[in-house]
Amino acid sequence: MNSAGSETDRKIKPPHWMSLELTYDCPLQCPYCYNPVDFARHRERLSTAEWLRVLREGRSLGVVQVGFTGGEPLLRHDLEILVAEAHSLGCYTNLITSGVGLDEARVRALRKAGLDQVQLAFQAPTAELCNYMAGRDVFQQKLEAARLIKEYDFPMVLNFVIYRQNIDQTSAFLELAGELKADYVEFANTLMYSWAWVNRAKLAPTLEQLRRSEAIVNEYRSRYKGKTKIYYVIPDYFEGRPKACLRGWGDIFFDIAPDGTAMPCQLARQLPGLEFSNVRERDLRWIWEESPAFNRFRGDDWMKEPCRSCPERHKDFGGCRCQAFMLTGDAANPDPACHFVPDHQKIVDLAMPSITGRVQGGELIFRNARNSLALGQ
Amino acid sequence: MNRVALGLDGVLETTPRFRLQWEEMQQSYVLLYPEGMVKLSLSAAEVLKRCDGKHTVAELLNSLKAQFPRGEGLEQDVRAFLEVAYELGWIRNRPQN
């Protein structure tokens, strides 16, 4: 390849998708929460004016998808203002919510603001387990939220997070999706990061459970064809192939944490040696194109063997940097979820003993400020 | 299996969860949907723009023929594309009132 060709390959593309974590506050305490374990230490919050600037800067970079998430984004009273701005800029706007606080007045206001779709998470298809995992009685509120979302004609994605305690309720989940008239179902096995990582030994399903649930999902796929589209996410530990995490570092996606820290993924702050800029100090264009942190794992120059010479590297981009760090202590290592990585089996077995049938029990550690401060020490 | 009704007096529209728009940064039309985006070829975009819930399939075909005068194949190509777009859930028959 000539040098001009490789320059073209390295050209930084515009981002498509930004995730705005409006707050880490949340009325729920799910023990698999994706927020950082030390969330309680990050207390700063961007103002309405600062979020509006982020939206405008992101749009001028090329962003078309905006995800409003948290914590619980409904806790921000300026949510409608931010949605309206994103909508008028021409973005497709996605609300990712627990449904708690989504009453009719807010659904109507969000409709008026131009919100495009709502993603509603369920902890379980039964009140008892759902309320237990959420840490309070929310099941009825979620059903009511789902009804309102459809009444106001939003496309609805139901996000079912799957773990050992609810995976045997797969049929009940999919029956619920049918009753609530979901347009999409994201049937997502818990990804073992953050709080789920802390609780992984107690949350991971067995391989047998996983295969059973997969078969049920496939059955419903044909039954719901043309009505509800079902996505099924299997943890990469089980497959031997690493996930193409966000299609590669700094490729199409970035995240803004509640305090304004801009990162290539929600969890990147845990990686040592990387300095992430804050939108209060730098504009997004510089952060996306120039900042050392966003360029650290772009392309494949950073890769080690076996990724470096692997034909799969343009499909999986070397897997997930956070997972590589969590399992091996070095974010620049190949993601050991890949079976080409030496010690793959040993590392996966340490991370996920349930795969080889060694199921561990114990008390779940719930996501709340007290536990966050205790674990962060 | 469900099939799109492509009778000449039928009316097609983009399914509400999909949004068609021109993207300056991509220099192309895109179709946006929950957490996703498809880049469209110009011809695909021209067909989808006409699935507006107002014009019949006959009007859609006539308008495309007027804009892209070429051989016999156009109607067949457009019908094939509409089948695919329907299968992917991008368009639907306008509900009867």
Image (cartoon, coloured by chain):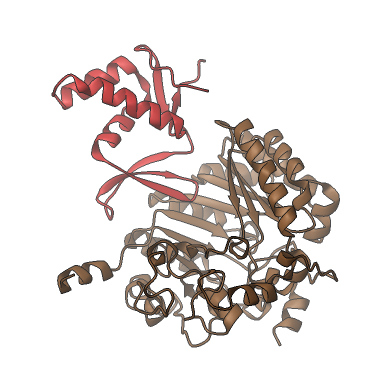
Chain colours: A brown, B red
- Left or right of residue A323: residue A125: right
Could you tell me which residue is drawn at 28 percent across and 55 percent down?
Answer: B25
Where is the C terminus of chain A found, in terms of image quarters?
A: bottom right
The one of A337 and B96 positioned closer to us in this rendering = A337
Viewer-proximal residue among A238 and A78: A238
- Give residue A343's quadrant in the image: bottom right
Q: Quadrant of residue A193?
A: bottom right
Placement of the N terminus of chain A among the 4 image quadrants: bottom left
Quadrant of residue A188 within the rendered picture: bottom right
- Picture coordinates of residue B20, whole percent (x, y): 36, 40
Q: Is residue B92 visible?
A: yes
Question: Which residue is pictured at 18% across the width and 19% down the height?
Answer: B72
- The reply, left or right, for residue A346 in relation to residue A52 is right
In the rendered image of this protein, does residue A295 appear above or below residue A8?
below
**Total numbered labels placed on residues in the image:** 0
Give the image location of residue A210, x and y in percent: 70, 54
Can residue B14 be seen in this snapshot? no
Q: Determine whether, in the image, residue A140 is placed left or right of residue A312.
A: right
Q: Please, is residue B29 above or below residue A330 in the view?
A: above
Report whether B67 appears left or right of B80.
left
Q: Is residue A275 above or below residue A70?
A: below
Q: Find residue A310 and report its horizontal and vertical position in percent.
A: 39, 69
Instruction: Locate residue A102, reporting x and y percent.
Output: 67, 48
For the point 58% across and 38% down, the residue is A183
In this view, the residue in front, A108 or B39, is B39
